[in-house]
């Protein structure tokens, strides 16, 4: 997640895009209606001109006609992309050469030529079965594009982790080569994960993932890798040939804004149904039968827990003592959390561990530190960090909450795991900084920890009585009417985008917090009344008063009915409430 700034033109283009929907019609015409430079990532999987049977599109065009049409839509894609935007193109052998040249002529630079190798390919008469598709990774500007190399879900385990089960392996794993393989266990020697040929199974007819109405459905796992590496949470992903809606569904699950075009009315109706069924944070599915196909989601989860496990060395007493000594010498009386939140202090701690000859990586040392603390084997801090932190305000807390919520999904990692890895922690700063610019890393991280603590406490206070008091449909008022007759501006507010509920926040001064939010355009395109405030009668009925703690409990309870996208999952009430 590179640190970069968007131009204000790009921000306002993004703001005027028709987002989070699929539009029926021709993509060339529809792309022309969009503002210039508002999209972060385009993934296009056009018809390959091989006579495939689609609903309305005829996939057998004259050579010149197909190339000219491709030129037109590629140019249209380039116009809507931001200057630092990325364009991924999936294409078969027949027109890979032509389309690569057309894209380059349009001004794209080819950053990587990925080969996706798959099983269950289409049979070819008098020829070899199709088993690969080309995936061109184009960018507008070679010096400025998003490439999230540190995202743990983009990385793959190294041979040291996977083959040798060596617990000194770098827990970060490694980046895949440009041949993507999804079942290395099937071809341990032919498809090494560090090579440039990818291996994902196609979505075969028997797979649960299959939508059933479209023959060219992209696997969610593959789309997730592309979306994670080439865009950041809350950015805009566009698919001009939506097909089964795989790109859009995965973008939604990963907390991106999305937009798709599709010629067929029938496909559009099916995509809409698919999109309705998924929400941000849902698991990225994989084929169901691991014996016959690439790993299903549950196997993917095992992989990430494997990653986590390898992030922590099993240490002997001598190493543990050494690590505690390095911690005490660096922290100078402050806590382990303080050390994780302060990038300079953390660097100092890591370098001390290295000098002391402790084997491992920064994430390893930090995770070990947290493990020792959890086991009660770390001396208690003598200084209280709270006292020196004065500038954690409500606006910052909202931004941190949204950033953790998005990153926990994007990285499939907990806040602790994020803070333990210096690269991931820097990305947390970046993302929180896009929602609330102007703070230092320490503030974003410390506020994230506080938000998590408050969330856990709040959800534990949600009772059946509180839920009953709120009722089924809480009433929100437009911001300008909510505080007309009172000087007390504390309350709970809801950030909306059209009919979608994005974030339920709370503040001692809602008017002030919302005015800060509105200034920062990362909060996304605003509708006329993007922020509404919970009717005070409900606050009063729920006996919330001015206490932040009670307000947070109410916020937690309200999540069950309001169901916004961007709130922290740990703020949602536990099942015990009986709801
Ligand atoms: C290869 S499929 C895309 C499959 C998709 N990537 C998925 O995972 O399901 C190509 C799709 O493009 C659609 N299509 C063809 N021409 C189009 C156009 N001019 N505008 C929009 N969609 C078009 C076809 O109907 C078809 O569904």
Image (spheres, helix red, strand yellow):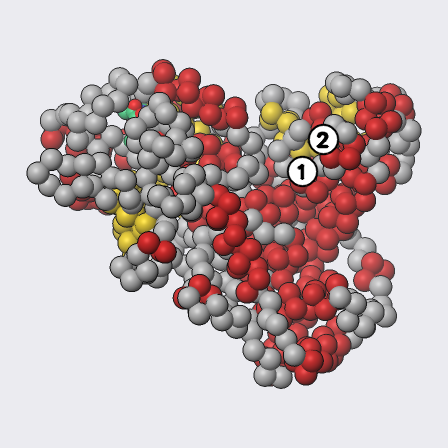
Question: What is the quadrant of the C terminus in the image?
Answer: top right
Counting the numbered discs, the total is: 2
Horizontal side, residue 342 vs residue 69: left or right: right
Residue indicated by mark 2 = 559
Residue 366 seen anywhere in this rendered image of the structure = yes
Q: Residue at x 29, y 62 (%)?
A: 189
Residue 426 seen anywhere in this rendered image of the structure = no
Quarter holding residue 65:
top left
Mark 2, secondary structure of its residue: helix
Q: In this view, which residue lies farthest toward the top? A: 265
Q: In this view, which residue lies farthest toward the front? A: 291
> Which callout, 2 or 1, points at the residue further toward the start of the chain?
2
Q: Which of the pair 188/160 is nearer the observer? A: 188
Whether pointer 2 and pointer 1 mark residues with C-beta atoms closer than 8 Å, the reply is yes
Mark 1, secondary structure of its residue: loop
Determine the quadrant in which ligand 1 lies. Answer: top left
Residue 230, compared with residue 316, is above or below; it is above
Query: Marks 2/1: CA distance?
Result: 8 Å
Q: Which of the pair 340/367 is nearer the observer? A: 367
Residue indicated by mark 1 = 567
């Amino acid at each position: 997640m590179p640190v970069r700034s968007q131009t204000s033109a790009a921000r306002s283009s993004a703001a005027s895009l028709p987002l989070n929907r699929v539009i029926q019609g021709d993509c060339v015409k529809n792309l022309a209606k969009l503002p210039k430079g508002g999209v972060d990532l385009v993934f296009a999987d056009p018809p390959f001109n091989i006579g495939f049977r689609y609903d309305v599109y005829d996939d057998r065009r004259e050579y010149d006609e197909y190339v000219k049409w491709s030129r037109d839509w590629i140019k249209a894609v380039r116009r809507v992309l931001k200057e630092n935007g990325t364009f991924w193109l999936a294409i078969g052998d027949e027109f890979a050469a032509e389309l690569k040249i057309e894209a380059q002529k349009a001004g794209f630079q080819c950053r990587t030529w990925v080969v996706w190798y798959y099983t269950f390919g289409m049979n070819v008469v008098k020829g070899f079965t199709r088993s690969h598709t080309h995936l061109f990774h184009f960018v507008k500007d070679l010096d400025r594009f998003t490439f999230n190399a540190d995202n743990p879900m983009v990385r793959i385990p190294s041979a040291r982790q996977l083959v040798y089960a060596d617990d000194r392996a770098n827990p970060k794993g490694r980046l895949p080569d440009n041949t993507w393989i999804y079942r290395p266990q099937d071809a341990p020697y032919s498809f090494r994960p560090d090579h440039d040929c990818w291996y994902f199974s196609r979505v075969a007819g028997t797979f649960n993932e299959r939508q059933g109405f479209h023959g060219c459905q992209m696997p969610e796992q593959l789309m997730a890798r592309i979306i994670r590496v080439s865009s950041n949470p809350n950015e805009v992903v566009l698919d001009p040939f939506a097909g089964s809606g795989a790109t859009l569904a995965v973008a939604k699950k990963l907390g991106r804004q999305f937009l798709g075009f599709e010629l067929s009315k029938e496909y559009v109706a099916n995509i809409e149904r698919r999109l309705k069924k998924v929400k941000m944070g849902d698991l990225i599915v994989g084929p169901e039968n691991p014996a016959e196909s690439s790993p299903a989601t549950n196997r993917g989860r095992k992989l990430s827990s494997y990653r986590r496990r390898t992030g922590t060395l099993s240490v002997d007493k001598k190493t543990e003592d050494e690590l505690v000594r390095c911690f005490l010498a660096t922290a100078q009386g402050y806590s382990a959390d303080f050390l994780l939140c302060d990038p300079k202090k953390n660097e100092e701690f890591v370098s001390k561990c290295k000098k002391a000859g402790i084997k491992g990586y920064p994430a390893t040392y930090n995770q070990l530190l947290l493990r020792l603390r959890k086991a009660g084997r770390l001396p208690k801090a003598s200084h209280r960090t709270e006292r020196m932190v004065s500038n954690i305000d409500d606006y910052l807390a909202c931004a941190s909450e949204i950033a953790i919520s998005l990153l926990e999904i994007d990285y499939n990692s907990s806040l602790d795991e994020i803070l333990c890895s210096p690269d991931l922690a820097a990305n947390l700063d970046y993302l929180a900084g896009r929602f609330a610019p102007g703070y230092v890393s320490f503030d974003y991280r410390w506020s994230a920890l506080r938000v998590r603590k408050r969330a856990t406490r709040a959800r534990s206070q949600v009772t059946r009585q509180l839920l009953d008091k709120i009722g089924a449909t809480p009433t929100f008022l437009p911001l300008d009417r909510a505080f007309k007759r009172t000087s007390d501006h504390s309350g709970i507010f809801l950030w909306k985008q059209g009919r979608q509920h994005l974030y339920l926040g709370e503040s001692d001064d809602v008017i002030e917090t919302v005015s800060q939010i509105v200034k920062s355009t990362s909060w996304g395109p605003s509708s006329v009344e993007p922020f509404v405030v919970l009717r005070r009668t409900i606050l009063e009925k729920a006996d919330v008063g001015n206490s932040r703690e009670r307000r947070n409990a109410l916020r937690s309870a309200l999540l069950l009915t309001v169901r916004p996208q961007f709130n922290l999952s740990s703020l949602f009430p536990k099942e015990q409430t009986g709801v």
